[in-house]
Amino acid sequence: MGDKNMTVTEWMLNSGASDHFTGDINDFVEYETLSKPTVVHTANAQTSVVGKGTVVLQIKNKVIHPILYIPDLTTRLFSLGQFHVAGLHSRGSAKEISVHEGDEEFLTFYP
């Protein structure tokens, strides 16, 4: 049986997101407030990025940086494009999309 104190945090893989985003300040292990908030456009609104930092995923202790902080965001998003820019590649099927670093699986996302 797993640790009852451990919380599950869901992240969505988004092929249209320009960057990685979270709306929960508690996700960060390192964080810095931006000197000037940056306006970003979402699918149906406009909001501001107010900070950025580093998030460590409990799965395989993967470090993701930078993650941008938008306080009113309700969903955590990973940018598929940013993973590709960082040199990772993806494979997909109807059952899953996996992101790989060389031959090693980095993360897997399920519908």
Image (cartoon, grey):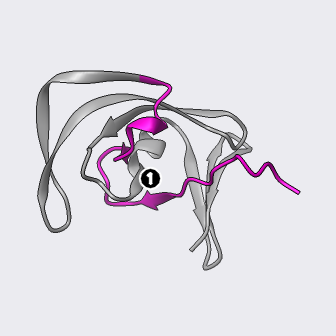
Tell whether 96 sits left or right of 55.
right
Q: Please give the name of the residue rendered at 32% of the width and 37% of the height, measured from the top-left corner.
A: 68
Q: Quadrant of the N terminus?
A: bottom right
Q: Please give the name of the residue rendered at 12% of the width and 62% of the height, measured from the top-left corner.
A: 45
Q: Please give the name of the residue rendered at 40% of the width and 60% of the height, measured from the top-left corner.
A: 14
**Above or below: residue 32 compared with residue 103:** above
Residue carrying label 1: 80
Question: What is the quadrant of residue 8 in the picture?
Answer: bottom right
What crowding class fits label 1: few (fewer than 14 Cα within 10 Å), some (14-19), or many (20 or more)?
Answer: many
**Three-letter amino acid code at disc 1?**
Leu
Question: What is the quadrant of residue 43 in the picture?
Answer: bottom left
Tell whether 10 sits left or right of 37.
right
**Above or below: residue 93 compared with residue 52:** below
Q: Main secondary structure of the magenta part?
A: loop
Coordinates of residue 34 in the picture (x, y in percent)? 20, 24
Tell whether 50 sits left or right of 31.
left
Q: Nearer the viewer, residue 13 or 2?
A: 2
**Above or below: residue 20 compared with residue 45:** above
Q: Nearer the viewer, residue 86 or 54?
A: 54
**Above or below: residue 90 compared with residue 93:** above
Task: Say which element carries label 1.
Answer: helix
Q: Which span is picked out in magenta?
A: 1-30
Q: Is 26 covered by the magenta stretch? A: yes
Question: How many discs mark residues in the rendered view?
Answer: 1
